[in-house]
Image (cartoon, coloured by chain):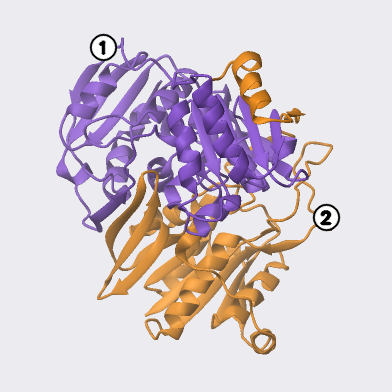
Amino acid sequence: MKLLVAVKRVIDYNVKVRVKADETGVETANVKMSMNPFDEIAVEEAVRLLEAGTVTEVVVVSMGIQQCQETIRTALAMGADRGIHVKTDDELQPLAVAKLLAKIVEKEAPDVVILGKQAIDDDSNQTGQMLAGLLGWSQGTFASKIELADGKANVTREVDGGLETLAITLPAIITTDLRLNEPRYASLPNIMKAKKKTIDEMSPEELGVDVAPRLTTLKVTEPVKREGGVKVESVAELVDKLKNEAGVI
Amino acid sequence: MAVLVVADHDNSAIVPIILNTVTAAAAISGDVHVLVAAEGSAAAAEAAKIAGVSKVLAADSGDYAHQLAENIAPLVVGLAGGYSHILFPSNTSGKNIAPRVAALLDVAQISDILEVVSEDTFVRPIYAGNAMATVQSSDSVKVITVRGTAFAAAEAEGGNAAIDAIDAADNPGLSSFVSAELTKSERPELTAARVIISGGRGLQSGENFEIIEKVADKLGAAVGASRAAVDAGYKPNDYQVGQTGKVVAPELYIAVGISGAIQHLAGMKDSKVIVAINKDEEAPIFTVADYGLVGDLFKIIPELDEELEKQGITPR
């Protein structure tokens, strides 16, 4: 069985994002970049399935500027076998990413594609479901547990009311939620080994996909700031304020 | 042109966030239709009573009992020609189905809108709500998910929409429901609660949540948790408030033993009144709190429970 994992390079989750003064976007110069945390969980799950012998190959894909190769190397250091970089300086929106991934799926013929449920930059939560739609495959989104067996997968999903388990036929798309696993840190020997693994480079043109954005960002602004209030000294004062000042209890 | 709202439901009732989604739809068009793909007709009957809905499309089939994306998406795609916009709630059901529909229609999806600027322009949060993007769509059909807390709820009663029965789409047979472990609680649901009291890692164990649950019951509050508390196994995933969990905006939000990571603030900073109780006076949660109380929560919460008792505070 073969797995494809998609990873995105995003501003590190610990960075306090700043909106640019000209309202065209957020500041990305000299900002620490990392693999999207949900994608790390996707890579970890794939590598665990590889180590368990359930799957035989894990291919990792990333899309965007040259530096995405660093993100691919991180996944290779975690244990993925080889990488694919779809290189472009153009903005890629989720629909375009899903179309590019669909072309790569045609070439690579994986049994399962695992993606993070959402990227922490644009917070779209779309790509996996879109890819499933384009391919006509089943989808197991927001997974907290995956069991692969006999041409199907049992996927336990984090839903509003708790957990739900679906049986989905392979080939399938699975997107990861937070509780699926805890990603490893790559060891130094594995980081060295990853440098020798191959990364194939290709362009959206070579894949025959029109990646023109469908959404135009007119402006990006700061959210309305919430002012901190007062510190109270005692429980009695707190209850009094909530009752008589705020009127909420 | 009319706007279609795709309803989330449990076959017997409509999920409350649909009322907010209908309000967003009404900001786009005066003609709001609701699709109820369900097993049985109870949910459709309820949808027809929502004020401002002009028509309910009811597809009654066992294939829709669990709202599998693979089954519902072709039904929505078949109806799309008659609509300028298709709206889903931004909950786990809407987020699961909407992008599949958008891809099949070859259109972008606009996720988690907070505001309708015009029929093609919307405001949505990015970077965990640390920036607001105003985006314009060039697609013929706009597929949108709606953040419930950003729109008022439409009246659940008072409407009298016609119910049109429509045929179910073919079941592609790609997936099936196995089981569910849903949290049973007598307390209100997080996204619909007027008051929420949430616990974080400061609670130190799942058992210790008991002390905030006692307070919750005096206030008629829902109980939530930070990601750290859920990751540590104190509470199940459906308690999580934050960027990737539930986004809430109650009248009163009480954060207990929660430091206030940006991912948590993203899920609750639109609450009307925020109270923070934390032993670390430098905790970021205090920067968004209207009322902060610094101290040991294991002392403060039982005291709070007593004080509420003494003052005869009961759920509203």
In the picture, measured across the screen, residue B169 lies left or right of residue B31, that is left
Disc 1 and disc 2: Cα gap in Å?
A: 55 Å
At a point 55% along the width and 24% down the height, the residue shown is B251
Subunit of label 2: A
Element at label 1:
loop
Taking the image as drawn, is residue B193 in sight?
A: no
Q: Nearer the viewer, residue B251 or B211?
A: B211
In the picture, measured across the screen, residue A121 lies left or right of residue B138, that is right
Type of amino acid at the residue the image marks with label 1: Asn
Q: Is residue A220 above or below residue B48?
A: below
Q: Nearer the viewer, residue A133 or A32?
A: A32
The percent coordinates of residue B230 (x first, y second) are: 50, 54
- What is the letter of the purple chain? B
**Residue beneath label 1, please?**
B160
The percent coordinates of residue A119 (x first, y second) are: 58, 54
The percent coordinates of residue B113 (x first, y second) are: 55, 33
Q: Mark 1 vs mark 2: same chain?
A: no
Chain A shade = orange
Subunit of label 1: B
Type of amino acid at the residue the image marks with label 2: Ala
Element at label 2:
loop
Taking the image as drawn, is residue A74 in sight?
A: yes
In the picture, measured across the screen, residue A104 lies left or right of residue A219, that is left
In the picture, measured across the screen, residue B150 lies left or right of residue B163, that is right
Q: Is residue A75 above or below residue B81?
A: below
At a point 65% along the width and 89% down the height, the residue shown is A193
Q: Are marks 1 and 2 in contact (CB under 8 Å)?
A: no
Asked which quadrant contains residue B89, the reply is top left
Q: Is residue A47 above or below residue A100?
A: below
Q: Which mark is residue A29?
A: 2
